[in-house]
Image: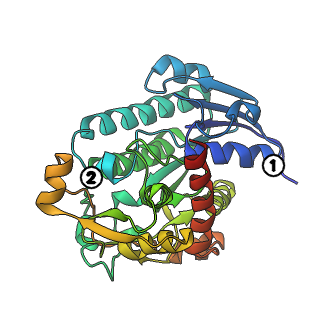
Amino acid sequence: MHMTKRILVCGAGGFIGGAMVKRLKAEGHWVRGVDLKYHEYFDVTAFADEFVQGDLRDPMICDNVVTEDLDEIYQFAADMGGAGFVFTGENDADIMHNSAMINLNIAEQCVRKDVTRIFYSSSACMYPEHNQMDPDNPNCTEDSAYPAQPDSEYGWEKLFSERLWFAFARNYGLTVRVARYHNIFGPEGTWDGGREKAPAAFCRKVATASESDEIEVWGDGAQTRSFLYIDECIEATRRLMDHPTFEGPVNIGSEEMIAINKFAEMAIDISGKSLTIDNIDGQRFQDKYGFPTPVGVRGRNSDNTLIREMLDWDYEQPLRTGMEKTYAWISAQVKNG
């Protein structure tokens, strides 16, 4: 039996934060959520004991929501999105400023209010580009982070903030837990508007397509990724937070790597439609969208050696199962318009 804790979830209006609010409430904890926005797909206020709509870039908001009575904080809040948001170049300054400001503010309040147990969600985007050039053999072991060379400012900010939290742990006695998430997906996540990631984007493109249409896939489609279903992410995160000594950083992801064209074909197959893939790249992409094709690294896959050893956790659900659930949810969203 867990003791009931008082927990703050930062980014509770987002995909992973919202899912964590639900999980913590199911465990019987008292939960305060904070976010710029309410959750798009369910009423987070019906789950959280308190929900504060506020901007964590504002030190006053952080002062209000980080209170002395808290036992733990889950820090998911960030300026984020998929390739169409992170790799265009025009959001770089905002991504770095907004996300860093949130972490700086919350870290300071943790010290002031003596809230000493904090989870921070980093990302596989912090891994160096030079280890992810081969789509068949990417290296994403935790100790491969340095020498650092992330391929986006989003990744650089994540790496900085990992270091920020560990520095606060050393100098101010905080207990910090850091995970590096690998492409978390599932129902109740962003699926349109430009910030969505590949699983939701493919589900949307397929769900909105008519029979025998083409769906657009950015790049040559040979680039590889792995994707982890939201419920598995939440379980692994809870295990890390509750571990007495292991602080990370640790990968939380799937090792089921797939080429992006194959992934798009999976979404098509789930739909039962007969659609073809149009790989858009180079000048044709530039002419259509006004920026170079945002494809990111050639290969990326989680390496779960460390998490298996330290937390006795591994992903269990095949990618296809998660995609079936996600496609069903997104196609219902599309139908209900």
The residue most toward the left is 283
Q: Is residue 245 above or below residue 104?
A: below
Farthest residue toward the front? 211
Q: In this view, does 272 lie to the left or right of 221?
A: right
Vertical side of 33 occupied by 215: above or below: below
Q: Residues within 10 Å of mark 2 (few under 14, many from 20)?
A: many
User: Where does the C terminus fall, quadrant-wise?
Assistant: top right
Q: Quadrant of residue 240?
A: bottom right
Identify the residue at image location x=72%, y=45%.
22
Q: Position of residue 233 (x, y in %)?
A: 60, 60
Q: Distance between the residues labelled 1 and 2?
A: 37 Å
Q: Tell me the residue that label 2 is attached to.
A: 152
Picture coordinates of residue 265, whole percent (x, y)? 44, 74
Secondary structure under badge 2?
Answer: loop
In the rendered image, the residue lying farthest to the bottom is 136
Drawn side of residue 97 relative to residue 42, left or right? left
Which residue position holds label 1?
Answer: 27
Q: What residue type is labelled 1?
A: Glu
Q: Is mark 1 on a helix, strand or loop?
A: loop
Q: Which residue lies furthest to the top in this view?
A: 60
Counting from the top left corner in percent of width and height, residue 213 is at 38, 64
Residue 191 x, y percent position in the rendering: 49, 49
Q: Which residue is drawn at 73% across and 35% down?
A: 31
Q: Compare residues 19 and 242 and report the one nearer the observer.
A: 19
